């Protein structure tokens, strides 16, 4: 301002306006021009004390929705109800397998043939229950676990004992066996005192007789089944297991029937007295899309064999053979009610025998009465599609 200039007179209102403008300019300098400083503070994750969140209607609605979602989320006892239902059904299926009807496709017998394998569903359901964090599903799994252990838990331990007065063995050598010589030699060194063979065809019969003669001086072949023994045999005869059915069955000559006979009975002379030995090969079963699990011949053979076993006078007896069924199968109830399994009494594990490359079922059996099983085992594979089995017995 020069000496000649005069300062204009300021009114009180102008002074107040100047003070207000100065205050706003100072605030902008602190917070950043145009509010930039406020955004920077928010972006850096810091909040100014005293700045309140939006409390408008939209925020309240979002909060209410979150509360509803949390409140409606099922608890651990309400999650996985489908898994829990499947677990209960699995347990009931194993528990009540004998009640599954056979009227439609023999579904009951099919389930019983592979009953132990239903236990594999337990870990699958357990994994699902843990993934869903379902307390209900985990609790429901107690039923199938308990039932499975009750049915098969006893097979998980080794019940065999050393010793035994006599070792018996059985093997379905297979009509299509590509190496009967090798199979015979494997069986000759198995240590069995009594050896039963099933599915002997006419061409291979001479091979087995020749290869086993040095170890077993006594033997008999009745149709497609045979018995080789280190001990004398007597009272040998074929057993009619109703291979033929219908009105023409009785009209066939005996020599014709013998050609396809599939069971025999003989007496083995031991130091402890006579032992009745049966060898049997029951009819095959098939899974057919039209009829389901076809077991007609097997079931008919089983009923006839059960009658022969019931009529046996010797208190001590052994049944060896391919029964084409597991002991859980109701079709064999007439046999299993009179004889008990050497594998169940003195075995280690399930003792599956078929198919040889990946055994899934024990259809080759050693059943006894009047003697005590000391051990039971599955022998090494041969060229057959079945695995051989052996058991040590004592008086």
Image: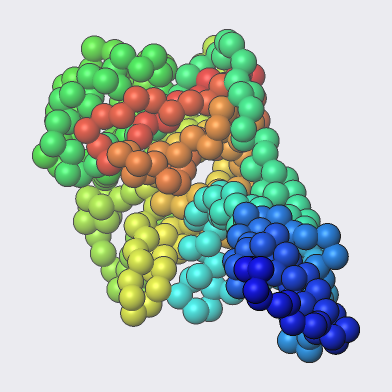
Q: At 34% across and 57% down in the image, what residue appears?
A: 284
Q: At 59% across and 11% down in the image, what residue appears?
A: 162
Position of residue 233 relative to residue 332, above or below, is above
Q: Is residue 329 visible?
A: no
Tell me where residue 54 appears, x and y as whole percent: 77, 78
Position of residue 47 relative to residue 386, above or below, is below
Q: Is residue 26 visible?
A: yes
Q: How is the image coloured?
A: rainbow
Q: At 20% across and 44% down in the image, what residue appears?
A: 175
- Residue reaching furthest front? 4
Q: Quadrant of residue 317?
A: top right
Tell me where residue 4 appears, x and y as whole percent: 65, 74
Front residue of 187/125: it is 125
Front residue of 204/219: it is 204
Q: Quadrant of residue 381?
A: top left
Q: Number of numbered discs present?
A: 0
Front residue of 80/239: it is 80
Front residue of 33/278: it is 33
Tell me where residue 189 appears, x and y as whole percent: 31, 14
- The C terminus appears in which quarter of the rendering? top right
**Left-right relation of 347 to 21:** left
Tell me where residue 35 appears, x and y as whole percent: 64, 70
**Left-right relation of 136 to 36:** right
Q: Quadrant of residue 320?
A: top left
- The N terminus appears in which quarter of the rendering? bottom right
Q: At 17% across and 44% down in the image, what residue appears?
A: 176
């Amino acid at each position: 301002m020069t000496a000649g200039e005069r300062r204009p007179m300021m009114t009180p209102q102008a002074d107040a306006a100047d003070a207000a403008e100065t205050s706003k300019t100072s605030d902008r300098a602190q917070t950043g021009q145009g509010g930039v400083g406020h955004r920077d503070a928010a972006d850096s994750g810091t909040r100014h004390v005293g700045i309140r969140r939006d409390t408008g209607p939209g925020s309240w609605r979002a909060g209410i929705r979150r509360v509803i979602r949390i409140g409606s989320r099922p608890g651990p006892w309400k999650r996985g109800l489908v898994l829990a239902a499947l677990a209960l059904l699995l347990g009931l299926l194993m528990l009540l397998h004998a009640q599954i009807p056979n009227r439609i496709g023999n579904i009951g017998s099919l389930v019983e043939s592979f009953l132990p394998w239903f236990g594999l569903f337990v870990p699958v359901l357990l994994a699902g229950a843990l993934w869903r964090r379902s307390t209900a599903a985990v609790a429901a799994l107690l039923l199938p676990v308990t039932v499975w252990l009750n049915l098969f838990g006893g097979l998980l331990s080794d019940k065999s004992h050393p010793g035994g007065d006599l070792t018996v063995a059985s093997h379905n050598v297979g009509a299509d066996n590509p190496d009967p010589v090798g199979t015979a030699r494997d069986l000759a060194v198995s240590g069995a005192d009594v050896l039963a063979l099933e599915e002997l065809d006419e061409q291979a019969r001479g091979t087995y007789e020749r290869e086993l003669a040095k170890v077993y001086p006594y033997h008999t072949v009745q149709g497609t089944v045979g018995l080789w023994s280190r001990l004398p045999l007597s009272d040998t005869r074929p057993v009619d297991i109703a291979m033929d059915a219908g009105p023409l069955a009785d009209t066939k000559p005996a020599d014709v029937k013998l050609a396809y006979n599939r069971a025999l009975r003989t007496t083995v002379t031991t130091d402890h007295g006579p032992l009745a030995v049966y060898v049997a090969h029951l009819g095959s079963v098939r899974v057919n899309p039209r009829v389901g699990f076809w077991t007609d011949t097997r079931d008919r053979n089983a009923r006839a064999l059960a009658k022969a076993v019931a009529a046996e006078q010797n208190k001590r007896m052994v049944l060896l053979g391919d029964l084409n069924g597991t002991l859980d199968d109701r079709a064999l109830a007439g046999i299993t009610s009179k004889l008990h399994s050497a594998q169940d009494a003195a075995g280690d594990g399930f003792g599956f025998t078929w198919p040889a490359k990946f055994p899934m079922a024990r259809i080759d059996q050693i059943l006894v009465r009047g003697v005590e099983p000391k051990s039971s085992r599955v022998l090494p594979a041969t060229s057959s599609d079945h695995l051989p089995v052996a058991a040590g017995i004592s008086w």
